[in-house]
Amino acid sequence: MIVVLNGKEENVTEGMTILALLESKDISPQVVVVERNGDIVPGENFGTTSLNDGDHLEVLRFVGGG
């Protein structure tokens, strides 16, 4: 199935969770905010939130600096 991740289409497996998607991209779930179809997904729900065909995801990383 296809999801849109930060504006790019990604082919993911059926039933993949947000956590599994982040891990497949070597993205630490502790340092990101995920928006799914316009709603922020709480970090504690990454492992239980399954993706659906056509979902739009925005993954934002925290960046330090001054």
Image: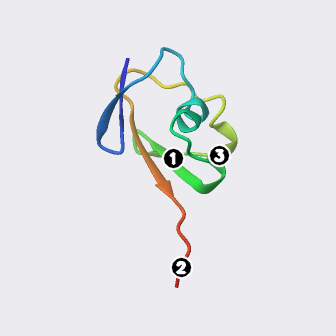
**Mark earlier in primary sequence (3, 1):** 1
Please provide percent x and percent y for residue 16: 54, 22
* Residue position marked by numbered label 3 in the rendering: 43
Q: How is the image coloured?
A: rainbow
Q: CA distance from mark 2 to mark 3?
A: 23 Å
* Residue position marked by numbered label 1 in the rendering: 34
Q: Secondary structure at mark 1?
A: strand
Please provide percent x and percent y for residue 4: 34, 34
* Residue position marked by numbered label 2 in the rendering: 65
Q: CA distance from mark 3 to mark 1?
A: 8 Å
Front residue of 36/6: it is 6
Indicate the quadrant containing the N terminus: top left, top right, bottom left or bottom right: top left
**Mark earlier in primary sequence (1, 2):** 1
Amino acid at dot 1: Val
Tag 3 near tag 1, CB within 8 Å: yes
The numbered mark at residue 44 is: none
Please provide percent x and percent y for residue 26: 56, 42
Asked if 66 appears above or below 14 in the picture, the reply is: below
Amino acid at dot 2: Gly
**Mark earlier in primary sequence (2, 3):** 3
